[in-house]
Image (spheres, coloured by chain):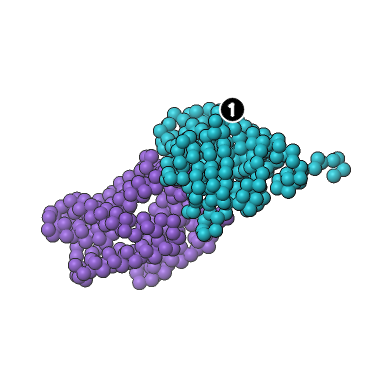
Chain colours: A purple, B cyan
Amino acid sequence: MTLGAYTAVASQAFFSGSVLIAALNAMVVTVAVSLFFYFWVFRRLTGRSHISLLISSIGIAFVVRCTITFFAGYDQYMIQTPITRAWNFGGVRILPTDLYVVAAALVALIGAFSLLHLTPTGRKMRALADNGDLAATSGIREKSVMLVLWMLTGAFCGLAGVLLGLKAVVVPELGFELLILMFAAVILGGIGSPVGAVIGALIFGIAQEWASLLVGPPYKIVLAFIVLLTVLLLRPQGILGRIVAVR
Amino acid sequence: MSILTIKNLSAGYSETYIVSNIDMVVHENEIVTIAGTNGAGKSTVLKAVMGLLPRVEGSAVFLGTELLRQPTEDRIRSGITYVPQVANVFGSMTVYENLQLTGEICGRPQGVREMFELFPVLAERRGTYAESLSGGERQQLAFARALLPRPKLILLDEPSAALSPALTGQVFEEVKRLKTMGVAVLMVEQRARQALAFSDRGYILDAGKIVLSGTGADLLGNEEMAELYLGRHPQPQTADA
């Protein structure tokens, strides 16, 4: 995500001021980097434990962050958007950019779910996630499915970085600051459930902002994690997670 | 005519082989049962043939093709399908999606309709997630997934595992039905006496080696060996029992 945001900033500085072109450039770069790390690291880790993959992911995040810092330093950047007047919805003023961000996120979400549920490739991805051995004996070619999966991962990360960069200052810690929150949202929604991840992220985000009103911004994260703990105490598998039997 | 010929097959997960020097043959349109004590390596033979083990040596020729040199995902395209013991369907997908996916992979999307005609209960449960199916329905879905590519041979790993005696009878009827469809079956089964009773031939494994082979009737007829490797014959229940 951080790389996507920085690529968008670079695209606006060196090629074109258009946010759309910046987003497309960001997605191309993050797809390329995603594939690079798949071939270099994750393909070799196939079959290893989830912990190995998690630690490797964090390691790669450090590499990407440090590389960005090496070239761009610690300066703060912004993704430039046209100056527009806020729209007034019965007294509630919303900037068009905010609505564009929400619309782009919704389109991406619908696209991801359509791909997972309505296309043969998506079904293969879900089958692989469900049971790798059964998928292999069913004739699913893991390598080609993983290639598409990593391309999509890169594209969505690039887009997410640009959308985040439109609302926040672009710094090397942009994505890293969200990492723990994203893990928390996924756990809250239920690991392995894409719909759960969306619901978890919404609950977590709303809980945080609501907590700002009650206890002030410095402590909002505490209240959000109390919500997480309460849900997990009542439903340890998360909101839409499944209890998996281990033999 | 033999369709699967296994020669000198040794397989395992690490340095030590679980099965060694296994020779086995499956002929066209016959049911062959692999029986034996717990831990004898029965399932290992099937997993080795399907390429699910890290260490395999020997040969497994299926319809003239050496399976052990093929990637696991290509073996289904040779005409051989595999039904694992418990995790034999994609639980997070619906009945329809399980069959639709199989149809897409083997290039037979029309096979979904055929399977619904063959297993009407699956048609009724088409929108149900596979993890919510009963044991019997789940086995039917697993059989349908295995049958959809029109295989010549199906490998079944303990189809009666975790099923009640009543459901076991139903599942064994389905296995017999496979033979009437012209499909050969190589089956690993813990309820060996019941399975051998309708099998054409059988192999008995002990400590990773074949100790006995023959027709189902011959193996069950050898009382001493049968008691040793297949367990005691179930005693008929009496009224005062």
Which amino acid, by three-letter code, is at mark 1?
Thr
Disc 1 element: helix
Location of residue A240 in the rendering, given as x and y in whole percent from the top left corner: 48, 52
Q: Nearer the viewer, residue A161 or B171?
A: B171
In the image, taking residue B1 as reference, residue A102 lies left or right, namely: left
Location of residue B191 in the rendering, given as x and y in whole percent from the top left corner: 68, 43
For residue B144, say whether it is visible. Answer: no
Location of residue B6 in the rendering, given as x and y in whole percent from the top left corner: 53, 42
In the image, taking residue A89 as reference, residue B170 lies left or right, namely: right
Q: Nearer the viewer, residue A241 or B203?
A: B203
- Which residue is depicted at the point 42% across and 63% down? A52
For residue B4, say whether it is visible. Answer: yes
Quadrant of the rendering where the N terminus of chain B is positioned: top right
- Which residue is depicted at the point 64% across and 34% down? B200
- Which residue is depicted at the point 46% across and 66% down? A226
Q: Give the mark count.
A: 1
Q: Residue furthest right?
A: B240
- Determine which quarter of the picture holds residue A184: bottom left
In the image, taking residue B64 as reference, residue A42 lies left or right, namely: left
- Residue A100 vertical placement versus A236 (above, below): above
- Which residue is depicted at the point 19% across and 50% down? A20
* Residue where numbered disc 1 is placed: B180
Location of residue A179 in the rendering, given as x and y in whole percent from the top left corner: 35, 64
Chain at numbered mark 1: B
- Residue A127 vertical placement versus A185 (above, below): above
Quadrant of the rendering where the C terminus of chain B is positioned: top right
Number of other residues with Cα within 10 Å of mark 1, as a class: few under 14, some 14 to 19, many 20 or more = few
In the image, taking residue A215 as reference, residue B16 lies left or right, namely: right
